[in-house]
Image (tube, coloured by chain):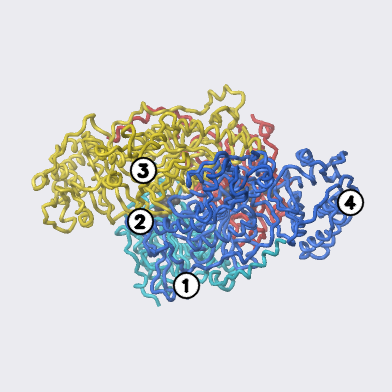
Chain colours: A yellow, B blue, C red, D cyan
Amino acid sequence: MIGGQAGQGLQTIGSVLGKLFARMSYQVFSHQDYESRIRGGHNFYQVRFSDSPISCSRRGIDILIALDKTTVQRHEHELNPGGLVIYDSEAVKEKYESPVFLDVPFRQLAEEAAGSRLMENTVAVGAVMGIMGMDLKPLEKLLSDTFLRKGQDIVDRNVAAAKAGSDYAEKYCERCEFTVTEPGEGGRLMFLDGATAVALGALLSGCRFYAAYPMTPSTGILTYLAAASKKHSLVVEQAEDEIAAINMAIGASYAGVRAMTGTAGGGFALMVEGLSLAGMTETPVVIYVGMRPAPATGFPTRTEQGDLLYVTHAAHGEFPRVIMAPGTPAEAFYLTNKAFDLAEKYQVPAIILMDQYLADSEWSLPELETSKLVYRDYRLRTEELDTLKAYKRHEFTDSGVTPLAEPGASRHLVVTDSDEHDEEGHIVEDAETRIKMVEKRLLKKLLQIKSEMSPPRYYGPERPETLVACWGSNLGVVGEAVKTLRDGQSIGMLHFNEIWPLPCMEEFDWMNLLDGAGRTICLENNATSQFARLIRMETGFEFDERINRYDGRPFLLEEVVEKLRA
Amino acid sequence: MIGGQAGQGLQTIGSVLGKLFARMSYQVFSHQDYESRIRGGHNFYQVRFSDSPISCSRRGIDILIALDKTTVQRHEHELNPGGLVIYDSEAVKEKYESPVFLDVPFRQLAEEAAGSRLMENTVAVGAVMGIMGMDLKPLEKLLSDTFLRKGQDIVDRNVAAAKAGSDYAEKYCERCEFTVTEPGEGGRLMFLDGATAVALGALLSGCRFYAAYPMTPSTGILTYLAAASKKHSLVVEQAEDEIAAINMAIGASYAGVRAMTGTAGGGFALMVEGLSLAGMTETPVVIYVGMRPAPATGFPTRTEQGDLLYVTHAAHGEFPRVIMAPGTPAEAFYLTNKAFDLAEKYQVPAIILMDQYLADSEWSLPELETSKLVYRDYRLRTEELDTLKAYKRHEFTDSGVTPLAEPGASRHLVVTDSDEHDEEGHIVEDAETRIKMVEKRLLKKLLQIKSEMSPPRYYGPERPETLVACWGSNLGVVGEAVKTLRDGQSIGMLHFNEIWPLPCMEEFDWMNLLDGAGRTICLENNATSQFARLIRMETGFEFDERINRYDGRPFLLEEVVEKLRA
Amino acid sequence: MPELEDYRGQIPAWCPGCGNFQLLKAFKQAMVELGVEPHGLIVVSGIGQAGKLPHYTRCNTFNGLHGRTLPVATAIRLVNHGMPVIAEAGDGDCYGEGGNHFLHAMRRNINVKLFVHDNQIYGLTKGQASPTSGQGMMTKTQPFGVLPENLNPVALAVAMNASFVARGFTGDTDFLKELLKRAMEHRGFALVDILQNCVVFNKINTSKWYKERVYHIKADEHDPTDREAAFQLALEFGERIPTGVIYRNDRPVFEDSLPVIATDPLVKQPYSIEDVAGEIQAFF
Amino acid sequence: MPELEDYRGQIPAWCPGCGNFQLLKAFKQAMVELGVEPHGLIVVSGIGQAGKLPHYTRCNTFNGLHGRTLPVATAIRLVNHGMPVIAEAGDGDCYGEGGNHFLHAMRRNINVKLFVHDNQIYGLTKGQASPTSGQGMMTKTQPFGVLPENLNPVALAVAMNASFVARGFTGDTDFLKELLKRAMEHRGFALVDILQNCVVFNKINTSKWYKERVYHIKADEHDPTDREAAFQLALEFGERIPTGVIYRNDRPVFEDSLPVIATDPLVKQPYSIEDVAGEIQAFF
Ligand SMILES: Cc1ncc(C[n+]2csc(CCOP(=O)(O)OP(=O)(O)O)c2C)c(N)n1
Ligand SMILES: Cc1ncc(C[n+]2csc(CCOP(=O)(O)OP(=O)(O)O)c2C)c(N)n1
Ligand code: SF4
Ligand code: SF4
Ligand SMILES: [Mg+2]
Ligand SMILES: [Mg+2]
């Protein structure tokens, strides 16, 4: 764990370490805890790595890099037996005598070896490598890959800084008893957070327009795509507010390209009217909603799963929507692709719902596979349009879906309206058209979309005595907990990531599984068990127990294990 | 029924007739069907009156006042046997020969008797009275009460116009076989629509601030309260948008007075963030939400119950709210009062959810009783505050409720924040405070509020074979239908008007009633059975049948009777 | 070449005598004279009487939400800058509900034409004051008369350095048509604030009232490229009301500054996953 | 009489060197000099670094939503016009998210004081462009540099005929304090746009950058009651940046025009159901 104040660069240290281990084929999970301020306060960044899959935060620290005194005060007691604190007594302005502490003069070493204080973080990374007695080669390679565009000199100085840290640690460390297992097989791994995985997924799903107003924890997507727009055929616009953002995305989609917007719960509030507009005009749009503890501004940089029922039911009137709640960055990537596909196929809004915990957590993962992505352009372009005698934007069809046409691509007019409209898109007042439009827009599509939703994934024995359900980011922690408990008890996990409309049971009768379990539990990061209630609304099923956490922090492995133990 | 184009004054005719019958102690129900335009098109206004309670629209017309040709074309076939059409052949530009038609030269009579075309609507009202052979005295009194402030001359001319219409109809009517029963006892009745009943309820509940942006079907409240602000201690402000409206209402409430805002589903979308703000800052606010068919602009002037789940779950984060869905104007009045009381008592937002049908329908009703109203000022004013040593706006208390203090009324500061905060209202980041605040703000209050909600009302035999549940405006139509069917079958109605949090079952075990019924039905004006799903979410109960209507029109009596017949 | 007939749409649901009829006429005539085909035009509109215009002619139409014409129009233009994009809005729509978008569209200088049907009243919702309603006007929701000062969209646009700022009047249909044409021909964001009588709800700013006041700005008396002079002229709104082009400049156009659409419109650019797949590598 | 000590609040979470510290100092000093007591003041703030100010002093505080200071402040003032009401907002807060309320607060001329911490950047969300960010500024979300023209709040306020329009600079703390006092003393809506350095995210408009440019408007060189002169002066923002009172007028104040609060503030008026119960009779 790296701890310190905002602005001290702990994220950089953490990310470099994580990426490094991933490249070395270790499984890595990292998680950030930070305050809503730019300098000062207390933040920390946790990196776990292992030879076997890991996917959540847990108690206990092996190596603590303390960039300030507060870090020592708050986290010293969390050290595992054999754990170690490394710090720079000059920076922390305190000298600790206990053998648990290793004083590494980050700053001084940086100045000596690299001629600049700025490289003290690289010294720290090097020190960690030294403590673990690990080869410096991979780190050197990573530094080179990262800094080469800034010049060979910067690379060399960073490498020197890393080496100084490593040498110092190896030399002075008295308690360095870490035995680092060999990494798993399978070659180097990617290292990626949940939000960026969504952004990457969007880019690789043909997203060509992104408009947003900055808001934690969604800004990462805006930043990633803005950078991508320098290289790729993509327009990214920072809107004046969230209302503009969603209306822009809808406008772009109407004009003929795949479009997306992103925000957090509070910004989504301002998009609710636009959501309804997308529903009425049958305009595909993808919306990323990052969840943070609310109501209102709440804890801007922390985590919660408190917006599920809100997002499921937001907006006046009745229309279909798709909601995806990925459990890992890899799921985030693939489900974003599915969201784009379903949004365009059925001409509905599709929402990616993710909490800050997953959005900001960086994970190692095997290379994402583009061959698994679906890309179909469902729109009518000039060629197809020119063959049509007539075109009606909202024509009644068997499926309820009327092909989208690109306005201006042919002589056919593309007319749509937020008022109730006829097949051509013009305003009407009559009951008959209304009924047919509700059937087209809502009822027919709903059934088809439901059948597209993949069932939850089950991990566990065939007839578990205890069954834990969860959704979204809790895949990791519940998964590890269940694995931990599996020796002693019959326990399984049911994880939902395609959550609305709730998947049918044809492919996999998950309701049967629930009904058959002796003890059913629903675990969520909120206070009112929103997912359990959603399940009850749609199926009547009631869980025996509910586990909730609502302090703005994610579940920790040990905590979940304790609660699930039979 | 009165039919014609927008701008022809059919609402005036209808309202005068309704008010007249109500004054004569008849039970009256009237309903408007109008398009989203200012002139032209086709609108109609239906007035039913009877000696026994009536509360909904039904098929069949006894007297049709046709102000244009379209009215004849669209409604002639709806005439009951013995029914009559009155029209002015000069205005309609068509002469109908069938004995069903009575040509009354409204315009000419108005000019002759009152010296102005403008009084043709009064002629029409007079004609209706003549057809039914009713005494003109009450009408004369009503005209006098209405127009006296414009001068005795206007009164006299209106009376003359009414008399001319009545005389003409009596003289020329060949098929006037209407036997009008004597009105019920109990003296004259009020005549009032649902939206105005809310506005009146607000005024009489101590509402001192109302901010809104115009939107059908909520503008009536703004108009009523704006007029009231000329006479009473009340500030009414037309906001620049709905975001401003709710933030103004919250600001006013923070400053120390009862405050309200009102809108329709689309405008409420823009208020969702503010709703969450009220939740976080524990600021009481009352919100009227008028429902019209959506998504988006939909049918701006028509009716639907499509916003229930939306309003129940709107806004990021978890906090309590109260939702009232009155079934009659009288309920609207009293439940508005309860909304104000609960909002302030528990410092939460309270919503009055009403569809256009009820908002615009005018009903007769016995005099509203101020003695049934609750008014308690829950706030700390100078006197109480001066006795306090310290004051913390969000102090932890047993009930979760911390008394609201008027800022500036004492030396104590009133501090609140949309961020998570401590007892004093200052921003925090720690988990412990968060947990305690969630318990205070949400969990503790939720239970208390639930216990304040009155159970649904049941009308029917003790153990009904068929049980129909409904909410809000369908009280009228289901009530009448059940009454109609009661002779032949064992049928009862369960009507919910205090709908969120769903009332407990301690006082009245309504779940037991539902469980015991052979056939349970939930009837709603929407396509996805939102109330039935809400019930299932909270209780697990599933209705056997669902009756839905979603064409923007209200249920008609005959239609419901047919569907409910065993 | 398009003809007037090509622009015939649904039958308007406006009140007889409403200034919108003349506005519609000027609109159609302008498009015909510019040689724009109905399918070669995208009109975005809001909610209100103004917002219905595209239905009463023929064109690609996005009739969206009240107040939100400009974000939709902005994005459409960014995606397809090969198409002229017009936003038809009401005064309530654009200066009330949508005021923020108005400010930011001007800042961006997106090449969208904004035609505001400024009847100084909320028409469709039956006569509440709009941001441009004159101070003192009595309505059912302004029982003490309108208290805030009326917003002067033209002065505001000059202050925001909007690229093209004009005022027209529906009763002066031919002149209005010319203004619309000039707005269409201008490169950059263009506002035409169109004084329009509402015969039902605005009994103050009637057709007659406007006729007595509006005058044409003379080319030799006003230089529309002079921002301070434009501001001064913009403030004139009372006994006399100037109509014509009040201000213009040739600020860089937003979509010209985006390299990605320097050549082809975004919607015309081919998309293939191969072009972007390489981005995966950055995460090793 | 209040003392500075009375205004001591929580420990600020701002970055060392942030201009907000000077702003806070000027704020406290102004209140003390005006003799306003902490409990005799209501401060509404938005979300952003600016919005945290009231926590770092002592006052009645409503720290609401991002962008929504003005509607809240407007209503508070209408309900209790016996209390001075201040809105503390960020530039993103007030001119971005809250732009529409800014326009309409000026129209109303509600007697609220608006102090905008204008650091020309989104601080709390880590450095995206704000509406006042200079054209060309590179940020992580503006990869081609800021393309829209920066909004000039002062020119906009003059165009909207705001009642009091001033610009200050945090680095010129004493002068700023005087401006805040003048704004407080003015009857009517008052905007003080306060140039404030953000040491972390705005590396262009640094304290030094401002210092080199800002100058005090001289009383004998500018008549702030002359709207056209004010507009001209307002447009100056580049090599030289005028600070001081740019414009003022004595338009009627909103709350003065409402008869119901002509005498007592609304919150001080007694409420009794008897006063209103008679309204029931109107429905017979
Ligand atoms: C969010 C939202 N708020 C309110 C409305 C109701 N509404 C419809 S049109 C309108 C105002 C119309 O005035 P204006 O924009 O001036 O257009 P006009 O009818 O005068 O042409 C309003 C408030 C709405 N449709 N959506
Ligand atoms: C509705 C909404 N959108 C976005 C945000 C995220 N957010 C918080 S502060 C801020 C901008 C801060 O910039 P500014 O207003 O200039 O204040 P500063 O931090 O620079 O003082 C944003 C976008 C939010 N809190 N609410
Ligand atoms: S209400 Fe006014 S603006 Fe609307 S159509 Fe009628 S005259 Fe025109
Ligand atoms: S980020 Fe900028 S504005 Fe925010 S506290 Fe730091 S220096 Fe000040
Ligand atoms: Mg208008
Ligand atoms: Mg800022």
**From this viewpoint, which residue is outermost toward the right?**
B171
- Local SS, label 1: loop
Q: Could you say whether the residue bearing mark 2 is in a helix, strand or loop?
A: helix
Camera-side mark, 4 or 1: 4
Q: Dot 1 corresponds to which residue?
A: B409
Q: What residue sits 32% from the left and 47% below the top?
A: A554
Q: Which chain does the residue under circle 1 lie in?
A: B
Mark 2: amino acid: Ile
Q: In which quarter of the image is residue B566?
A: top right
C222 or D133: which is nearer to us?
A: D133
Q: Considering only vertical position in the picture, is A487 above or below A216?
A: above
Q: Residues within 10 Å of mark 1 (few under 14, many from 20)?
A: many
Mark 3, chain letter? A
Q: What element carries label 3?
A: strand
User: Which comes sooner in the sequence, label 4 or label 2?
Assistant: 4
Amino acid type at circle 3 is Ile
Residue C147 appearing in the image: yes
Residue C243 in view in this figure: no
Q: Mark 2 points at which residue?
A: B435
Callout 3 and callout 4 share a chain: no
Estimate the spatial distance between the alpha carbons at disc 4 and disc 1, rounded to whole Å: 68 Å
Label 1 CB, ligand 2: below 8 Å? no
Q: Quadrant of residue D280?
A: bottom right
Q: Is residue B125 left or right of residue B31?
A: right
Q: Distance between the residues labelled 2 and 1?
A: 31 Å
